[in-house]
Image: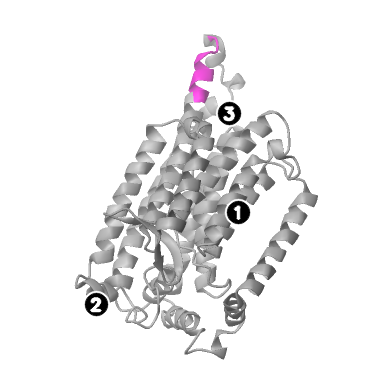
Amino acid sequence: MRKQFLFWDNPRDAMLTLVGILMLLGGVNIFSASFVVADAMFNNGYYYLFRYVIFGLGGLVAMWFIGWKTDYHSWLAKKHLIFFLAFVALLAVDIFGRTTKGAQRWLNLGFVSVQPSEFVKLAILILGAGYLGHLMDKGQKPHLHKTKVNMAFIEAGILTLMVAVQPDVGTAGIIMGLMIILYIIAGLPLKEVAFLGGAGLLVVVLAIAKAPYRLNRVLIWLNPWVDPQGNGYQAVQSFVSIGSGGWFGTSFGMGTGKFFFLPEAHTDFAFAIFCQEWGFFGALGLIALFILLAMAIYRIGQNTTDRAGFLLVTGVNFFVVGQAVANMAMVCGLLPVIGVPLSFISYGGTSLIVTLAAVGLVISVYRKEIQKSKEEELSKPAFLRNNKARRTPYSQGRWR
């Protein structure tokens, strides 16, 4: 990796700048998308914006602590404890959780409600990197039929099942999907990848057979206009909001979708309001920001010499940017409605904290790689350190 990343001195600075811009856009969009419903429900149009700022500050503290005050290896070393805590948190949801809209996903802590399944996404990245990184260091590949080297997949399966019974099939799919991606990156044989694909398809069929409403959701996804005033209402209103934005948008605050036309306008479907008020070019700019963020994180991972660190950074990239892509595809009708948040842009306190904590893990990997390259450089004899022709890629200024 070269020292410079586009207009920035290094990819870490690029990542932090892009995250800051996305959070600023998220705050603006959440206020615009929520002030109508917030005023109606809480007599305070700034209700959701205020909570976004509070959770955002909490997330930034988590990012700072994880990124600058801890070594990511310490998190990987605690993978057994992290799995146990994730298991207990999901079990607490099943026993004490608050039911909302037919799903028991929230845990009320008194002063705030949290969604433990969001923290499980972060736990999955740590579990996968911890187990598979160690396996890669020994020159081995993961195999699904070898229990001793397959604990990450087994633990991910347990957590996925616990989330699926809440029920939250969308989040459960993301959790298992993240682990499968890490396994593929770690070298899972193609035959076993194909087996997982077939098994996943079978699980989807069985899930639909068990709950007919899921089949109805798929049919509505294929043609929401069949029932535009019923099951297809949300998708149709999303299309209306996006289409009415035109090329340049209706201008800030003037989108009509949030006036009780589009359900979940400030959460899962916040991108529709963004498109309505910022237009096609605004949406294109937002997509460009996520592409740049993916490139910056990829650059960090590409030059991470530690295999566990590489897996962790790559997993975070799929989590943060991949989840954003899935949300935008869902809102545009390219995917069924699966309840995936749009990173930084849609409202969700737990999701925002977890996303920023994940960015902190990338910073920790980056910081340790810089430290390692400096130590390697200083350990060399002076005449080698001064000989540019014999410098390592990292000593040539690839990292800062």
Answer with left or right where residue 105 lies relative to residue 43: right
First in sequence: mark 3 vs mark 1:
1
* Three-letter code, disc 2: Ala
Answer with the quarter of the image where residue 367 lies: top left
Residue 274 x, y percent position in the rendering: 39, 71
To which residue does mark 2 refer? Answer: 40
To which residue does mark 3 refer? Answer: 393
Q: Are marks 2 and 1 in contact (CB under 8 Å)?
A: no
* Three-letter code, disc 3: Pro
First in sequence: mark 2 vs mark 1:
2
State how far apart marks 3 and 1 are (Cα).
36 Å
Residue 322 x, y percent position in the rendering: 54, 57
- Residue drawn 34% across and 82% down? 260
Name above or below for residue 10 compared with residue 55.
above
Disc 3 is placed on an element classified as loop
Name above or below for residue 168 compared with residue 224.
above
To which residue does mark 1 refer? Answer: 176
Query: Which of the labelled discs sits on residue 70, or is there none?
Result: none
Disc 1 is placed on an element classified as helix
State how far apart marks 2 and 1 are (Cα).
38 Å
Mark 3 crowd level (few <14, some 14–19, many ≥20, 10 Å Cα): some
Q: Are marks 3 and 1 in contact (CB under 8 Å)?
A: no
Magenta stretch: includes residue 380: yes
Magenta stretch: includes residue 237: no
